[in-house]
Amino acid sequence: MSQISVHHRLIKDLPFEKSPLGRKPKDLTRRRREARRLSELMACTPNFSFVRLGDMQLTMLLGHQLGLKGPVEETHETVSGVSAHGNVGLSMVYAERMWESFERATYVDYCDRMWPNTHLLPRLHLSRSNVLHRNPDPETSYIFLTWMEHEFREYCEDRCIGMVGAEVRLLEQLLKDPEYRSASRGIWPSSATWHFFQPRDDGSNLDDNLDATAEDLRHWIRATGVDTVFVSLGGAAKILCVELASELGVRMFDFGALLRGLTYSRSPGNRSCRGSHLPFLFKLPFELWCTALEIAYPQLSDQQLLAKLHAQLILELQMKELGWTHASWEFDFSAANIRNFRDAHRRYRSRYSSKFHGSTGVQQERARFLEFCGQHSLTVEGRLFRGIALTKKRLSNALINW
């Protein structure tokens, strides 16, 4: 095949759905029952592995099944707090190992209520033992959102818990702040023991680092004695959770973007762009988050820092439902959200305006953000910037046609 990605090749002819997951169900009875079953299975199975079949893992597996070649996804990601980007984190080199993990995992959530899984899942031919577990139906899929909202706190009580992912340093910093603990008090248990692991390269370069990261985790799990580990490492989490649970007799949970949910962070810990979605658990004040970010990631360039700040500002306008997630393009321009954005924007200007006139990359990042603000009439400077840009474009077109 050509250099078109495996993912794009498989989804390009599917009917598009504006909301990949839809709105949060009003009646959670069946979902809460399945979330409780998941907790019970974890509690009685020491070598338990929970993994989710995200859209990019599904197309990766289908590509492997069909013998397709080429990249899993396009690799045009840039530093941008306005542009959103998802990343499976692994190449097709790991497709067979990913396939084996999904066949062996104790519990697979097929995410079959989500686009494009709804359309593509019937084409996948995994062979799983009947003694293993899965979500019973589409209504109970994407179950980790409901599990997080209703089971996480009780399950973690009196346990020794590990957290792994690119946002771990940010989470550790936030946990030191009483304001954060107050905002998140409905989530955290009162008596758990916590251990945190920041992966090498902050979870980047997993194609090169996967086996070394697995070895790092082996040593850390044995040293800490954790009995349950929540892993946010993209596609690599699917492989690591299954292999290490079986080898070490520990519970491994594919945590996905929930680590970003716990840090109320719109950008991934290892990239300066908007993530493709964010599970919403609670809201944090903009300045509280900024302070923790600066301490946790002091190595960020001005361009990277501004991109993360812009992503965080735009989060104020994101559609939010407690215990649910929405795609990056699902906005809610309500009066309350716009007020929240403008309040955070004032603090952003007061705190970071000295960084606005730096490198070419900084200026490009600012331009993208100002264009977004102008497009949605969010700020005066954004409207002025967009107005000037449109005027220049009209004059240029007029000169060309003169």
Image: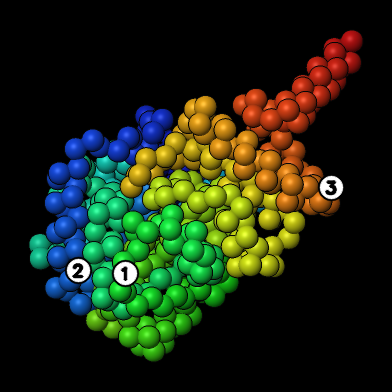
Q: Which mark is residue 164?
A: none
Q: Earlier in the sequence, mark 2 or mark 3?
A: 2
Give the residue pinned by disc 3: 357
Classify residue 45 as left or right of residue 186.
left
Spatial CA span between label 3 and label 1: 46 Å
Q: Position of residue 222 (x, y in %)?
A: 35, 88
Give the residue pinned by disc 1: 190
State the residue in front, 312 or 270.
Answer: 312
Q: Position of residue 59 (x, y in %)?
A: 38, 50
Q: Residue lying at the far bottom in this picture: please name it.
A: 223
Q: Amino acid at mark 1?
A: Ser
Q: Is residue 273 visible?
A: no
Q: Residue lying at the far left in this picture: please name it.
A: 130
Spatial CA span between label 2 and label 3: 52 Å
Q: Position of residue 390 (x, y in %)?
A: 77, 21
Give the residue pinned by disc 2: 42
Quadrant housing residue 164: bottom left
Q: Earlier in the sequence, mark 2 or mark 1?
A: 2
In the rendered image of this protein, does residue 28 appear above or below residue 252?
A: above
Spatial CA span between label 2 and label 1: 20 Å
- Provide the secondary structure element on which disc 1 rests: loop
Q: Amino acid at mark 3?
A: His
Q: Is residue 186 visible?
A: yes
In the rendered image of this protein, does residue 402 appear above or below residue 360?
A: above
Classify residue 316 as left or right of residue 279.
right
Quadrant housing residue 132: bottom left
Q: How many marks?
A: 3
- For the point 58% across and 56% down, the residue is 288
Q: Amino acid at mark 2?
A: Met
Q: Earlier in the sequence, mark 3 or mark 1?
A: 1
